Image (cartoon, rainbow, N blue to C red):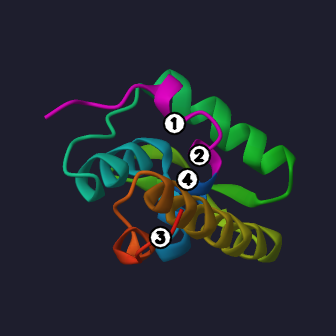
Amino acid sequence: MQVMRAEALKGHLEGLLLAVLREEPLHGYAVLEVLRERSGGQIDLPSGTVYPALHRLEAMGLVASGWSQVGGRRRRVYQLTDDGVRTLEEHRRSWQTMAKAVSTVMNVGPAATRSRTV
């Protein structure tokens, strides 16, 4: 199994983070763990990639953060805003369109089974 590097996710990291936070508010390290778990270990990013992205999303108004106390430790917890939910839906639609197009071009989608006359 090959682990994806942050560079491979360029342009998709924002959508992935929003998708993870759609389920429940999480602190940064928990976001990393969920990404790793849901991807079967293929997305294993350093915290130095995720925390700046979370801060960018917050500056854009797509996530909000607050502090929580867990086991005597303060943690910054992130959650989606209404704008974040809308943006996530846009990312999902865009991803589905792109994935379908790439699959078709790579001859693994439904269009590959159609016969062509040249």
User: Mark 2 belongs to which amino acid?
Assistant: His
Task: Report which residue position mark 4 lands on.
Answer: 17
Q: Quadrant of residue 49?
A: top right
For mark 3, give the secondary structure: loop
Q: Quadrant of the C terminus?
A: bottom right
- Point out the tag, 4 or 3, that comes first from the N-terminus: 4
Disc 4 residue crowd, few under 14, some 14–19, many 20+, Cα 10 Å:
many
Location of mark 3 (residue): 116
For label 1, the residue is 9
Q: Amino acid at mark 3?
A: Arg
The magenta region covers 1-14
The residue lying toward the viewer, choosing from 33 and 115, is 115
What kind of residue is marked 4?
A: Leu
- Marks 2,1: beta carbons within 8 A: yes
Which of pointers 1 and 3 indicates the residue nearer the eye?
3
Dot in front, 4 or 3: 3
Q: Relative to 68, is 4 above or below? A: above
Which of 91 and 41 lies nearest the eye of the viewer? 91
Element at label 4: helix
Residue 6 part of the magenta segment? yes
How far apart are labels 2 and 3 at the CA level?
34 Å
**Chain-order first, disc 4 or disc 2:** 2
Secondary structure of residue under mark 2: loop
User: Which residue is under mark 2?
Assistant: 12
